[in-house]
Image (cartoon, grey):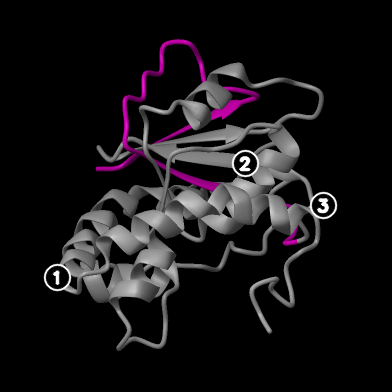
């Protein structure tokens, strides 16, 4: 049975995450510069999801310590957005990083879809509900439905990483994936400077 624990402002001192740690964020919208960060979700891969509500004017040193710990791998789905948002709003660079979306695009070239919902269904036979995706994440108290949605975004990332690593190695693209992951911090900085579309690598 999965457990969801909500904290306001920061992780408490007694929560020890040794990694790898699954991470996701919820924001007021998809504009990196305009829409504020509201929630950071973490999971240790053992069925617990920690939801940290980001409070205006309150620092979160324990959360930042986890996000910047070089000995803890952070697993994201679409890390490009989350890493940039955390850098913009919390002022810290997240590393090291693994992105299940990039891994899927490199390993599952036969699939037209690389969403978290598709990955969970295709690789884990788990159906995710996404109705809360566009709900108001700035509320003071998260609903049970919001909590479950947010938790689902991190509870399965460890399992997906295991499956995707097998596929990446089978297809000879594991090292290439690692190189892509290491570039995400730079990609986030480019996005925050509005070097997004067209991509600077385009003609």
| 33 and 58: which is toward the camera | 33
Mark drawn on residue 160: none
**Where is residue 162 drawn, in percent x and y?**
21, 55
Q: Residues within 10 Å of mark 2 (few under 14, many from 20)?
A: many
Q: Quadrant of the C terminus?
A: bottom right
What label does residue 39 carry, if any?
2
Near mark 1 (Cα within 10 A), the count class, few <14, some 14-19 or many ≥20, is few
Q: Is residue 86 left or right of residue 23?
A: right
Which residue is the site of mark 1?
170
- Which of 142/165 is in front? 165
Quadrant of the image containing the N terminus: top left
Q: Nearer the viewer, residue 91 or 25?
A: 91
Q: CA distance from mark 2 to mark 3?
A: 16 Å
Q: Which residues are magenta?
A: 1-30
> Counting residues from the N terminus, which is met first, the one under dot 2 or under dot 3?
3
29 inside magenta stretch: yes
């Amino acid at each position: 049975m999965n457990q969801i624990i909500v904290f306001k402002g920061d992780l408490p001192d007694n929560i020890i995450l040794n990694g790898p740690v699954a991470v996701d964020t919820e924001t007021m919208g998809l504009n990196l510069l305009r829409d504020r960060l509201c929630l950071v979700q973490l999971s240790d891969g053992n069925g617990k999801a920690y939801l940290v509500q980001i409070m205006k004017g309150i620092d979160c040193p324990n959360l930042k310590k986890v996000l910047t710990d070089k000995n803890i791998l952070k697993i994201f789905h679409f890390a490009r957005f989350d890493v940039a948002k955390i850098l913009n709003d919390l002022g810290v660079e997240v590393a090291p990083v693994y992105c299940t979306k990039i891994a899927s695009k490199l390993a599952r070239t036969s699939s037209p879809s690389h969403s978290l919902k598709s990955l969970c269904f295709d690789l884990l036979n788990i159906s995710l509900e996404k109705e809360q995706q566009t709900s108001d994440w700035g509320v003071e108290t998260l609903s049970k439905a919001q909590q479950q949605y947010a938790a689902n975004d991190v509870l399965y990332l460890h399992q997906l990483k295991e499956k995707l690593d097998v596929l990446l190695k089978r297809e000879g693209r594991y090292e290439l994936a690692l190189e892509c992951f290491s570039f995400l911090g730079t990609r986030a900085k480019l996005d925050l400077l509005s070097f997004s579309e067209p991509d600077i690598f385009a003609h």
